């Protein structure tokens, strides 16, 4: 009988279970294990007693059993609460992109300054700290990055607790103060560089740079690699401009006033960042000290291999930034292009740091990360190791900047993809804190190879760097395979 031909049942009480004077209509036939279950007709609106039929209980039990069976095959996903939906990433909008702008300026002023340490190292070796060995001078930059990373866990937890509204201004005050103090340091007094440039600057920078990165996961999800790429490219821009400023301004106005010019630029960048950065999620209570480094992440095999891969990769990745200029000066003394290798490297790394946001969703975050790390090792062996000719070095720094750039960009998205959103700050901080020891050891150990600066010793440095990058790429590939064993899967 067609559906529309059934007689309408009037509204009534809980006892009205069938049409008055008519036969009970079989509404649904359900067969389970050869037995035929007959269900009553549509029940009219009534009291709560009519809302559950005895046969419905059997059906509910049947569906519950099926749900239990299917739960074994598919992981349970928590139902988002209305509060979670209200603070979900917007993946765009004025406030989101305004936050990217402010965070990029923070990255320019903090990690960009650290990226440009190679130019400081050349100046310190040649003019300002000539009484000290290249290894000890490289420790200034290594300790700078070490402190940046080791305090990342604390800054991440502090960001989760109080948000960016107070943390970014606090970072700006410390960073600008450290630069003004650096401008008053004296030649051949290396402890002053350690105190101002390595310690004070890095303590301030870590409370700006890492909260800026964590903010990207609050505002973006699908577009997070692109947003982080824009932020990290700000640090590349700093690594490009600060060395050029040092080379151009120091002969004209001296070291002290050059650093003060950088300090005023940094102050301006922080003021704009304070006005353009918007918080997205509510803060939460500050965790116990024992919870700052969220060691729960190390129970995840993927997180463990990702951490090991990043440790070995960052052990190697900074050596070209620190030593490519010295190798050029060794092989081609007096060349006009020698001071600009680091600037070229940082300029091309902008492409490498922004491009993951455009292609990561097609290739996969983990895929792009391990491939770029292995390619950077290949370039070390194929170009930097084979020749120190000026043309060859230019080709090397251009290509190395492009292929090494994704490593810096993809760490936060990869960590965020395997981490609950409320723990991103602390777990990302734990990752960087784990990498800190590699930053502290990598470039000074590299400097030990070139205590005597000649071509053979530089080749030893390059071999060491390339091997560490290959090991890192292997661990990153293992993390990717844990995510999905299909070789061509987009992960």
Image: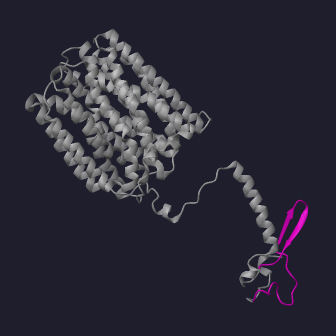
Residue 270 position within the rendered picture, expressed as x and y whole percent measured from the top left: 24, 49
Confirm whether residue 385 shows in the render.
no
Residue 292 position within the rendered picture, expressed as x and y whole percent measured from the top left: 43, 46
**Image quarter hosting the C terminus:** top right
User: What residue do we see at 14% from left, 39% from top?
Assistant: 260
Give left or right: position of 370 versus 163.
Answer: right
The residue at the far front in this view is 289
Q: Is residue 14 magenta?
A: yes
**Image quarter hosting the N terminus:** bottom right
Q: Is residue 292 magenta?
A: no
Magenta stretch bounds: 13-42
Residue 243 lies in what quarter of the image? top left
Q: Nearer the viewer, residue 392 or 465?
A: 465
Give left or right: position of 54 versus 363.
Answer: right
**294 vs 35: above or below:** above
Confirm whether residue 80 shows in the render.
yes
**304 vs 13: above or below:** above
**115 vs 429: above or below:** above
Residue 135 position within the rendered picture, expressed as x and y whole percent measured from the top left: 29, 20
Q: Nearer the viewer, residue 111 or 403?
A: 111
Residue 112 lies in what quarter of the image? top left
Residue 120 lies in what quarter of the image? top left
Give left or right: position of 203 versus 258.
Answer: right
User: What residue do we see at 48% from left, 35% from top?
Assistant: 307
- Characterize the magenta stretch by its predominant secondary structure: loop
């Amino acid at each position: 009988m067609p559906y529309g031909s059934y007689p309408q049942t009037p509204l009534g009480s809980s006892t009205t279970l069938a049409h008055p004077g008519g036969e009970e209509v079989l509404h649904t036939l359900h067969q389970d294990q050869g037995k035929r279950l007959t269900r009553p007709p549509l029940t009219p609106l009534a009291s709560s007693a009519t809302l559950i039929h005895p046969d419905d209980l059997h059906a509910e039990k049947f569906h519950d059993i099926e749900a239990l069976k299917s739960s074994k095959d598919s992981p349970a996903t928590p139902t988002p609460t209305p509060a979670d939906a209200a603070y979900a990433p917007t993946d765009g909008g004025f406030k989101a992109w305004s936050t990217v702008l402010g965070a990029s300026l923070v990255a320019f002023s903090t990690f960009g300054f650290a990226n440009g340490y190679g130019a400081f190292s050349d100046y310190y070796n040649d003019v300002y700290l000539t009484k000290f060995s290249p290894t000890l001078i490289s420790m200034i930059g290594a300790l700078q990055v070490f402190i940046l990373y080791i305090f990342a866990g604390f800054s991440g937890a502090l960001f989760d607790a109080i948000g960016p509204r107070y943390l970014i201004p606090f970072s700006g005050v410390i960073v600008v103060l450290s630069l003004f103090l650096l401008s008053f340091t004296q030649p051949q007094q290396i402890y002053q560089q350690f105190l101002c440039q390595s310690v004070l600057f890095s303590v301030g920078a870590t409370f700006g740079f890492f909260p800026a990165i964590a903010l990207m996961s609050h505002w973006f999800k699908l577009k997070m690699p692109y947003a982080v790429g824009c932020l990290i490219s700000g640090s590349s821009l700093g690594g490009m401009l600060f060395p050029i400023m040092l080379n151009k301004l120091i002969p004209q106005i001296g070291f002290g006033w050059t650093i003060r010019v950088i300090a005023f630029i940094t102050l301006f960048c922080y003021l704009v960042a304070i006005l353009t950065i918007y918080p997205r999620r509510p803060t939460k209570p500050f965790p116990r000290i024992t919870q700052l480094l969220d060691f729960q992440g190390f129970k995840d095999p993927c997180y463990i291999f990702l951490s090991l891969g990043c440790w070995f990769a960052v052990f190697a990745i900074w050596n070209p930034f620190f030593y490519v200029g010295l190798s050029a000066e060794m092989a081609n003394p007096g060349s006009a292009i020698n001071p600009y290798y680091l600037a070229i490297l940082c300029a091309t790394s902008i492409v490498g740091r922004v491009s993951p946001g455009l292609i990561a969703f097609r290739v996969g975050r983990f895929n792009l990360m391990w491939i770029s790390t292995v390619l950077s090792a290949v370039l070390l062996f194929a170009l930097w190791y084979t020749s120190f000719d000026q043309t060859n070095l230019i080709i090397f720094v251009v290509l190395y900047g492009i292929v090494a750039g994704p490593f810096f960009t993809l760490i936060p998205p990869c960590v965020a993809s395997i981490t609950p959103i409320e723990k991103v700050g602390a777990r990302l901080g734990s990752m960087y804190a784990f990498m800190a020891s590699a930053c502290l050891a990598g470039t000074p150990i590299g400097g030990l190879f070139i205590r005597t600066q000649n071509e053979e010793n530089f080749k030893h440095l390059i071999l060491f760097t390339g091997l560490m990058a290959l090991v890192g790429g292997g661990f990153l590939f293992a993390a990717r395979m844990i995510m999905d064993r299909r070789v061509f899967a987009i992960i």
